[in-house]
Structures are given as C-alpha cells and as structure tokens.
Image (spheres, grey):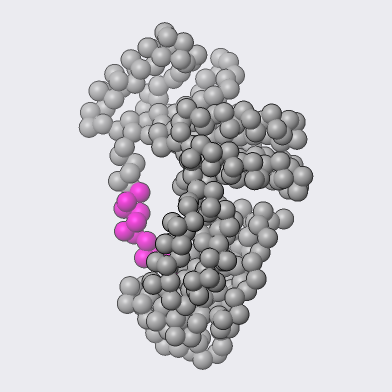
Amino acid sequence: ASMTSKPVRNQSFAMINCDDISYFKKILGERGVVLEEEKLDDANTDWMRKFKGSSKLMLQPRSTQEVSQILDYCNSRRLAVVPQGGNTGLVGGSVPVFDEVLKEAAKLGEMSQLMLGACALFDTVHFMEVFLVLKHLDGLRDPLPSAKHNFYILIETTGSMESHDKEKLESFLLQSMENGLLNDGVLAQDVNQASSFWRIREGIPEALMKAGAVYKYDLSLPPEKMYNLVEEMRERLGTAANVVAYGHLGDGNLHLNISTRQYNDSILSKIEPFVYEWTSEQRGSISAEHGLGLMKANKIHYSKSAETVQLMAAIKKLLDPNGILNPYKVLPTSILSQSGV
Ligand code: 2HG
Ligand code: ZN
C-alpha cells in the first residue's frame, strides 16, 4: 500500500524508442546503457518498497559532459529523467513515478560525499529508541543494562584533543546526573564501543522496517516542542500503533515514525493531516532532512507560503522549461500546470 495517491502521467512526455537507445549507446557506450529488467526493478523500487515506477532504461554517465549530453537530448525529445544516487530516500524522491529515464548519479557523487564527511566534524546530539532496535536487530547490547529508560540521547564530540572531549563529556554527564536531568549514562571507552552505540542509533530505521508497516514523518520543530507532538500522537493512537521518535536534537529534526502491523487507512486518517497541521502551527517544517519527494509534493503549503511556492515554480520553469527533471516531485502538480511546466 502506498501513502500517496499517484498523480497521472504527464502526456507531454515522450516514450522511449529504439532511436533513443541507439543514441545513448553512441554517447555512453554499451556499458552505460542498462536495459536488464532485474537491475531496473531494483532502481524502480524505493528501499521501503512503498513507491514503484516502471522505467525501462537506466543511464550511467561517467563525466559531467556525458550528463549534459544526456540532458540536452532528453530535453529536446521531452523525455522525463530521474537522477538516482543510493536510492535510500524516504519520500519517493529518487524513484521514477512512471516510465522516466533513470540516470545513475552515484558515480558522480564524490563531491557531495565530501560534504557529508565535513559535517561529521561537528558535535552531534541524537535521541533514540533503544529497545526497538535491540528487539529486532542481532548482535547489539543494551548500553545501560541496569534499568530501562524512556528516552536516550547519544552525544558525540570531535574536538582536536581527545582527552579534552572526554573531560567535557564526563563533567557534563556528572553535572546532569546531579541536577536530575539524566538518570544514567555511559561514556564510550574506545572507538569500538562508540561504534556499538552508533549502531543502535543507525539501526532504528531498519528495526522499524522489521517491526511491520511504518508511517514516516521527517519534521523540524522547536526542540522544546518536539516531544509534545510525540505525546499527543501517542494519546491519539492509543494501542493501535507504536509511536517511535528519534532524530537530530541539535537541529530540531524529529523523525516521527509510527509503527503498525499493517498499513491501514483508519490509522492514516488519525495521523494526517493532524501531524502536518500541528507542525505548521508551530511554524515548523514538514520536511526537515529528507525532502518532499513524491510523498509530500502536495503538502508543501504546510510549511511554505503560496508566494514562496509560486517563486519555486518560476525558478523551476526557468531552469527546466519542459519540466523533464524528476517530475511529480516536490511541487504540487497544480502549481506546475498553472505555470505551464
Ligand atoms: C536517520 O536519521 C535517517 O536515521 C532516517 O535520517 C530517518 O528513517 C527515518 O525516518
Ligand atoms: Zn535523520
């Protein structure tokens, strides 16, 4: 079951024919043109298995020049294109909706990876759900086995001097325990232990997938309000669902994940539009880290004004006059048809 009703195919886009394929083989060589159904099937399906397209062709350019040749051609032929990296998106942003041409971006992605690497240098504070992960994933240990707690935070600092980081964290832990802010805590003694803590934090999405169906929301909210939404949602849903909250405390990013045995419209109607309205009232954003994709293209008005959305559509029209780039995503189809995209 999908959480989004599918838009209709934009009939101004052409369908791929043999001439197109010959042209792509000419510029990319045989190796750059993938037609095998099995490979396409993976790329057509998002990793949560919620969104599925029917692309018949994947291109693997290896230079920016090849990329620009592909886009020139697709634009002149009105062939819609979906660039795809790791295909680990959560909002249906990286899979085709219909028969768009797939363009593998992984081989060109080194620059933006660099950027992720640089980000990791900053101190990070995450909050997380521990038991869910311990229950569903193997080989992990409870870092604070003496008692069960409701709320865990994971803090990592990366200063230039390890001993100084350690001192800072030790005194933070001690002080916070003294004034009742924290019940319990543990400091990783070496990199192995640190990475075992991280495995718990990073295992949450996987554990949720194993637990059953999951409704995912990626919100940004004032940090002091974040948990109110979680509590309200728990009240609203009662025993029908397990409301799981984790995320990036430092930037006010709440991953509200609602786990149920199966997808079910009555649960969905208790979650939406409530979750979007609540976020909008707090002047938060309904898409903090993972974009709007297909899933939230028609929800953008909860966090952006009509003027801003018009402006975004105008910029899109300027850069992509035929609307061939990743269509049906981010902006509502109604706005784009008004602006003639
Ligand atoms: C994370 O912080 C990722 O673990 C995934 O951004 C978020 O699964 C999610 O909702
Ligand atoms: Zn995240």
Q: In this view, does 9 lie above or below 149?
A: below
Magenta part of the protein: which range?
A: 104-116
Q: Percent x, y for residue 212?
A: 70, 43
Residue 20 seen in this snapshot: yes
Quadrant that contains the N terminus: bottom right
Q: Percent x, y for residue 236?
A: 70, 33
Which residue is depicted at the point 57% across and 53% down?
299
The outermost residue toward the bottom is: 19
Q: In this view, does 238 lie above or below 33?
A: above
Q: In this view, does 321 lie above or below 258?
A: below
The outermost residue toward the left is: 160
Q: Does the magenta stretch include residue 105?
A: yes
- 124 lies left or right of 2: left
Q: Is residue 189 above or below residue 93?
A: above
Which residue is depicted at the point 33% across and 73% down?
63
Quadrant for residue 205, please give it: top right
Q: Nearer the viewer, residue 288 or 122?
A: 288
